[in-house]
Amino acid sequence: MTEYTLLRWIPLLPLLAAVIHGLMLGLFRTHMPRWGVIALSCGSVLLAFLFAVAGFFRLVGLPGDESLIDHVYTWIGSGVGDTRLVADVALRMDPLASVMTLVITGVGFLIHVYSIGYMDDDHREDRGFQRFFCYLNLFTFAMLVLVLADNLVLMFLGWEGVGLCSYLLIGFWYGDRYNAYCGSKAFIVNRIGDFGFLIGLFLLFSAFAQAGLPTSLDFVDLQANLDAIVALTMPAPFWGDEWRLVEVIGICFFVGACGKSAQLPLYVWLPDAMAGPTPVSALIHAATMVTAGVYMVCRLSFLYAEAPVASALVAWTGGITALFAASIAIAQTDIKKVLAYSTVSQLGYMFLAAGCGGYTGAIFHLVTHAFFKALLFLGAGSVILAMHHEQDIEKMGGLGRRIYKTKVVFLIGVVAIAGFPPFSGFFSKDEILLTVWASEVPGHTWLYATGLVTAALTSFYMWRLHFRVFWGECRAPASVRDQIAEPANTVLFPLYALAALALLGGVMGIPQVYGDWVGVESSHSLNNFLAGVFPLEDSHAISHALEYGLAGAAVLAALLGLGLSYFLYVKRPELPGQMATAARGLHKLLVEKYYVDELYDAVLVRPLVWVSERVLFRGVDAGLIDGLAVNGMARGVRGVAENGLKYLQSGLAQGYVFLMVLGAAAIVGYLVGN
């Protein structure tokens, strides 16, 4: 590893900006001028991006599997001998961390710029311009710590940091009770996943201590010494005699990933995260928080390579989540909710790839998804601004004639996520489907079919969204219709950049078969760049003809979704309403998201509230602690005082003197008598 002390400045710059904002707002109770907020917040992220670019080129120039390391200081040092735990504040940039850092700072900077125009245009009573950018900078810092951390303990610090910042940003307009509820929901659901992460971390440390190996829990040591714990087992709490410890650890970490990356059954917080400002939706759902779980699984790929059961669980959970969320998205009418469930579905695609051993494909789709999903969310924000904060697509229509620039860039995002060549989404989705087809995960053919059906549904609901918003007659009220216009250039310029990335971003990972076809010599450069990070992936033992066939099937699925959407929402727009009436039960089920929130509320939330209120609060806290222990003791002392002790006090000084003399005489008599 090569020492590179500039790494610390990548997360430190956004942190310094957040601290300055926080001191001004919290300590000095003053506001920075608007230009100062913009320069500090956007400038810090831009500088972090430039440092990330410099680190990338420094990394590319290193031989073999070298990486950059920046040891800041020793953070935790406890225990002795084989149970000693050391955790450093140390940052490491290898190819995987480099890719993630460039995405976070690059896309994050565009979202910061977009936020200037979006928050200026917002007309709420308390816009909190500086407070908003303070939270954005803090969020960026936490995510950068997460991906650059050299060890699991420091990663967990960043992991918790993005959870806190998501609470602050989703509930940014906390004066609205619903927004505050959504922020709390995201925070609580993520704590459930974080508990799994912690259990996995403790088990991993315990396993190395059991094997007689001191560990710092840094990723290099974990990978180098993993063979020492592969054979360890633990008693099975439910079925079987023993479980392999590495499988249990992998499952525990995946529980944490399900919380952060919104997979079944912990996905319910992410659609409600739409309560925050639209730039927050883009930041959380595209390039940062929701990708943390995928990154963590890929970072621990050496562990999952030795845990086939945990890997199969990752793959099947991802596949089922992808199909489940896509089916919900086809019936939603809130423009941001459609994109939210789309995010859940696309994250499922990434886990599907990772569980099948296609870690490069998962990261490839993570990167392209950051491009086109940020574009779609920011494009949706542009539509919302033009519609004066109306989000119901049933009250839109015909906007392509009024906001043509937004329509074009939004269309690029739709084509990319739908998987049409040569847009970026086609190449990353094709790589995932190819990996699933060639994998040895139990039931991989069913997983492939699930991925293919999900691709068709994705194309359908995204084209439905595009047609309902930009085509046909405008369904907005007359008072809104007359004021529809393109937003400011600060909103549009980031959209242009993201549109270019969504169009061309697939070039970084074009598989060799397409590279040969189009004459690109250094094709699949992303795979070559990440080759030293992940375990050696099995080469696809299929012919080029079959590879083209699988790609053709993916394109046909996208075309099927486009054709069906065009027929229903352009050629025969009356049919969707008739179909919804005819299949009222199914339509209601999809609109209400399979009643999962209601189920959780009935099975988990209400019983917990009842136990908390009736048993813990009234019975234990108010009854036992306050009533019996605290107030009971006070009542006992008061009773003794009122019924006996108070009569010993008369308030007459001569009486006290008489008793004192009498007592002294009694003592003297006792002493003389003995």
Image (spheres, rainbow, N blue to C red):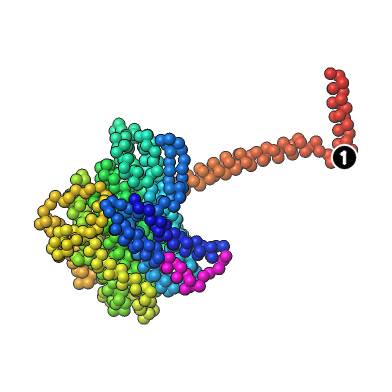
**How packed is label 1: few (under 14 Cα within 10 Å), some, or many (20 or more)?**
few
Q: Is residue 278 visible?
A: no
Q: Residue at x 21, y 45 (%)?
A: 441
User: Residue 506 location, x and y as percent?
Assistant: 23, 63
Left or right of 387? Residue 666 is right
**Quarter of the image where the C terminus is located:** top right
Q: Secondary structure at mark 1?
A: helix
**Which quadrant of the structure image shows residue 411?**
bottom left
| Dominant secondary structure of the residues highlighted in magenta in the image | helix
Q: Is residue 106 left or right of residue 441?
A: right
Start-end of magenta stretch: 28-44
Name the residue at 53% across, 65% down: 25
Q: Quadrant of residue 331?
A: bottom left
144 within the magenta span: no
The x and y percentages for residue 557 are 18, 61
Amino acid bearing label 1: Ala
List the residue tagged with mark 1: 653
Which one is nearer the viewer's eye here, 202 or 220? 220
Q: Position of residue 427 (x, y in %)?
A: 21, 61
Query: In the shown orientation, is residue 80 left or right of residue 674?
Result: left
Depth check: 36 or 399 in front?
Answer: 36
